[in-house]
Image (spheres, rainbow, N blue to C red):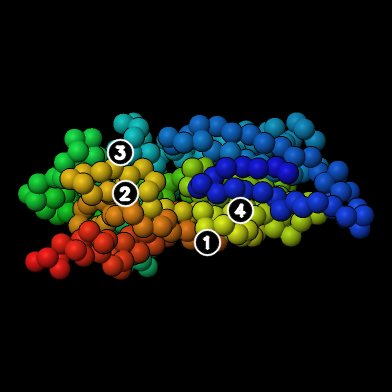
Amino acid sequence: MILLGAMGFLCTCGERAERADDAPARAARAASRAWTMSRPMAGTEFSVLLYTDLPAADVEQALARAFDAASALEKILSCRDAESELNRLNNAPHGIPCPISEPLASALRLALRLAGETHGAYDPSLGPCIRLWHRARSRGELPSEEKLIRALAASGHAKLKLDAQSATKLVPGMRIDLGGIGKGIMLDAMAAELRRSGITRYLLTDTSDLLAGDAPPGKTAWEYTGTGGGSIPLLNEAASTSGGGMQHSVIGGKSYAHIIDPRTGLGIRADLPPSTVHAPTAAEADALATAAAVQAARSAPPPPAAKEACQAR
């Protein structure tokens, strides 16, 4: 059994003990060799598991092109790289159109579309709030109301105007952060490169996302086991998880997740189960999982301690 860890899930190719009539499955696997490769990118580990009968040299070149495509996108979309194209936009003055490349324009178009579809639960313009929340987590204290108001005023996906070849920040201090969608975009680019090379049986992973192609040889789907148990098939689609206790911090006796609610500028509750979303692409799953975690936190009842405090009043 071949296993890959991602999203806190156990990912398998759906293999089981074979019976005598499983000869076709054995023959299919014998005709396709398994390949694995990993590379650190975007602050995490990207991994590929694939099956193909292509010659070794062709597979190695396809894998190199796939990882290079993701690496090239990281240089464009990263908010950590001071030299990235995204940070060139972030550092540009507001109110003036900033020329952008097609890869960045495509990423922003998708991010703004998903922000609209989720009614802002996913928002790529939260850079000011994210910076403020990172400082709050490192210091162990919540930001002041004044700082929160300023950060929220500089955020909001409706305040970013996107044209065919330029982007305009409509308010001062706005900073775009594609951390909630960038890794998914990178996985999608890797999958596109593999398919251009004739490789369709693959499972791509990063810390929080899975992207599956055609099923492994002799099987009907890839499978992953979520934190709640049970095997879930994944075939030519993506899955992403977000929220819960992943990367949580305790401030003032309350546990906060690293995901920010665009309404408050603060991290959402970390005591709720993580949200997992399936979508046609890894980018969509990545952003929609963030939105699902935010929406779940908004609709959840107060924790027991909060209930008791309310009753005491």
Q: Where residue 135 sits: x, y (%)?
A: 20, 37
| Residue drawn at the location 61% of the way across and 36% of the way down | 65
Q: Nearer the viewer, mark 4 or mark 1?
A: 4
**Does dot 4 land on a helix, a strand or a loop?**
strand
Closest to the observer: 172 or 149?
A: 149
Residue 278 badge? 1
Amino acid under label 2?
Ala
Q: Where residue 191 sits: x, y (%)?
A: 60, 48
Q: CA distance from mark 2 to mark 3?
A: 25 Å
Q: Nearer the viewer, mark 3 or mark 4?
A: 4
Task: Specify whether residue 265 is in view.
Answer: yes
Q: Where residue 176 sits: x, y (%)?
A: 29, 47
Earlier sequence position, callout 1 versus callout 2? 2
The residue that label 3 is drawn on is: 87
Q: Nearer the viewer, mark 1 or mark 2?
A: 2
Q: CA distance from mark 3 to mark 4?
A: 36 Å
Amino acid under label 4?
Tyr
Neighbours of disc 2 within 10 Å: few (<14), some (14-19), many (20+):
many
Residue 224 badge? 4
Closest to the observer: 17 or 306?
A: 306
**Does dot 1 land on a helix, a strand or a loop?**
strand
Q: Residue 43 lies in what quarter of the image?
A: top left
Q: CA distance from mark 4 to mark 2?
A: 24 Å
Q: CA distance from mark 4 to mark 1?
A: 12 Å
Amino acid under label 1?
His
The residue that label 2 is drawn on is: 257
Q: Residue 37 lies in what quarter of the image?
A: top right
